[in-house]
Image: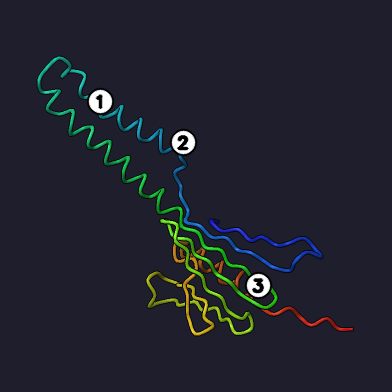
Amino acid sequence: MPYHWTRPPQGADPHIELALWPHRSLPRRGFAAFVLATFTLICIPLFPLLGTVVLWGLLPFLLLAVGGIWWALEATYRSARLREVLTLTPDNLRLVRTNPRGDAQEWLCNRYWARLRMHPEGGPVPHYLTLAGNGREVEIGAFLSEEERKVLHGELADALRPPAPVAG
């Protein structure tokens, strides 16, 4: 799953951190291999045209096609720089969203007043997750798949539940 919980060791500062990021199925090495394979396959029909004027007429368009594929795939990597980090402390809840261009948005709320809501319909995506509190409602994990948002909802609900009082 494209998110990770970080829990401190026993006796350390009792904060929990959740980091979320968009999933990318094509690693950088696969990206390079795909562009190279595309270039190779586009060049195969050019072999009979070597030494002709037609080659020079087709070559710019074929290179433009490879460049377009490279640009489109690179744009998906730029959008993958999106990160969301949710920090739960005993008193507060803090969500920091770092957008692909590097600007950050922050939301802070008293943990007691924070409410997690799942909107099965009516949101920009099915099973849309939001956190409400401190007069604002913010989205979390909109880039996750529907199944991942459902699982995350259960995990977040458990993490937000106040700890049981210690009897003694």
Q: Is mark 1 on a helix, strand or loop?
A: helix
> On the image, numbered disc 3 is attached to which residue?
159
* Upstream in sequence: badge 3 or badge 2: 2
Q: What element carries label 2?
A: helix
Could you tell me residue 128's position as x and y percent? 45, 72
Looking at this view, is 56 or 110 the one in front?
Answer: 110
Could you tell me residue 134's position as x and y percent? 53, 83
Give the residue type at disc 3: Ala
Give the residue type at disc 2: Arg
Which residue is at a point 40% across and 69% down the rendered structure image? 125
Q: Is mark 3 on a helix, strand or loop?
A: helix
Where residue 11 sits, quadrant-wise, is bottom right
In the rendered image, the residue lying farthest to the right is 168
Q: Counting other residues with Cα less than 10 Å from the Cα at mark 1, is it few (<14), some (14-19), or many (20 or more)?
A: few
Looking at this view, is 63 or 148 the one in front?
Answer: 63
Which residue is at a point 25% across and 29% down the rendered structure image? 42
* Upstream in sequence: badge 2 or badge 1: 2
Give the residue type at disc 1: Cys
Quadrant holding the N terminus: bottom right
Could you tell me residue 24's position as x and y percent? 46, 50
Where residue 127 sits, quadrant-wise, is bottom left
Q: Distance between the residues labelled 2 and 1?
A: 21 Å
Look at the numbered discs 3 and 1 and tell me whether their residues touch, using CB distance below 8 Å: no
Could you tell me residue 112's position as x and y percent? 64, 83
Looking at this view, is 112 or 102 the one in front?
Answer: 102
- The circle on residue 77 is none
Look at the numbered discs 3 and 2 and tell me whether their residues touch, using CB distance below 8 Å: no
- The circle on residue 43 is 1
Which residue is at a point 69% across and 68% down the rendered structure image? 15
* Upstream in sequence: badge 3 or badge 1: 1
- The circle on residue 29 is 2
